[in-house]
Amino acid sequence: MDERYPIGKFELAKEINTDVIHTWIQDIAQLPSQLNEICSSVSEIALDTPYRDGGWTARQVVHHLADSHMNSYLRFKWSLTEDEPTIKAYDEKVWAKEQEAKYGDINLSLKLIEALHARLTTVLKNMSAEDFQKGFFHPETSRRWQLDKTLAVYAWHGKHHLGHIKNSILKSKS
């Protein structure tokens, strides 16, 4: 198994329909409780253990999820309220090296993720099929991202990083 991809690399569903979109929305809705459950009894040693050699610590992963999904929420809102907006990219690796990401209290990010996902889930559940066809332009990839595919990526992203946190916990015990 490639430790970088504990649940495998992202693969877009062959067919995107309302059932698949509903599943992805459920994944988004459930991430905060899954994250809280995993982190509820995690030790400081586990929080500061990288999930792989050269990888982020569990603490950095939790803060990254808050940062990344906050950007995702904004991308959805901009796409729903503007015509093909160009989003602001950010360097996640630099953000993860910031002091608050390396040493900060994960409870702040856990609370942020809980509130953020409640808002995002409300937005997603109220989107029409046409809304999911809207999108934004990403300046780093120089391409348009459609919201249904963006939802798929972030549903996978949460599970992907839950796997990293589980790996950090396992590594801290060995």
Image (cartoon, helix red, strand yellow):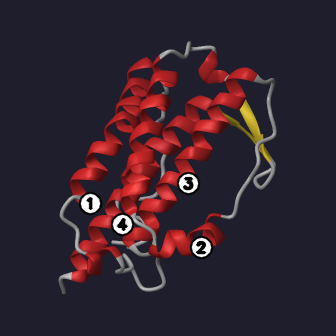
**SS at circle 2:** loop
> Which dot marks residue 29?
none
Q: Which is nearer the N-term, disc 1 or disc 3?
A: 1
Q: Check contact, mark 2 vs mark 4: CB within 8 A.
A: no
Q: Check contact, mark 2 vs mark 1: CB within 8 A.
A: no
Q: Which is nearer the N-term, disc 2 or disc 4?
A: 2
Kindly identify the amino acid type of the residue bearing the numbered disc 2.
Glu
- Name the residue: 46% across, 78% down: 55
- Name the residue: 76% across, 48% down: 88
User: Is 76 situated left or right of 112 in this image?
Assistant: right
Question: In front: 1, or 140?
Answer: 140
Q: How busy is the neighbourhood of tag 2: few (under 14 within 10 Å), some, or many (20 plus)?
A: few
Q: Which is nearer the N-term, disc 2 or disc 1?
A: 1
Q: Which residue is mark 4?
A: 164
Q: Which residue is mark 2?
A: 98
Q: Which is nearer the N-term, disc 2 or disc 3?
A: 3
Q: How busy is the neighbourhood of tag 4: few (under 14 within 10 Å), some, or many (20 plus)?
A: many
Kindly identify the amino acid type of the residue bearing the numbered disc 1.
Cys
**SS at circle 3:** helix
How far apart in space, not on screen, are marks 2 and 1 (Cα)? 21 Å
**SS at circle 1:** helix
* 85 vs 4: above or below: above
Q: Which residue is mark 1?
A: 39
- In this figure, what is the number of numbered marks? 4
Residue 42 appearing in the image: yes
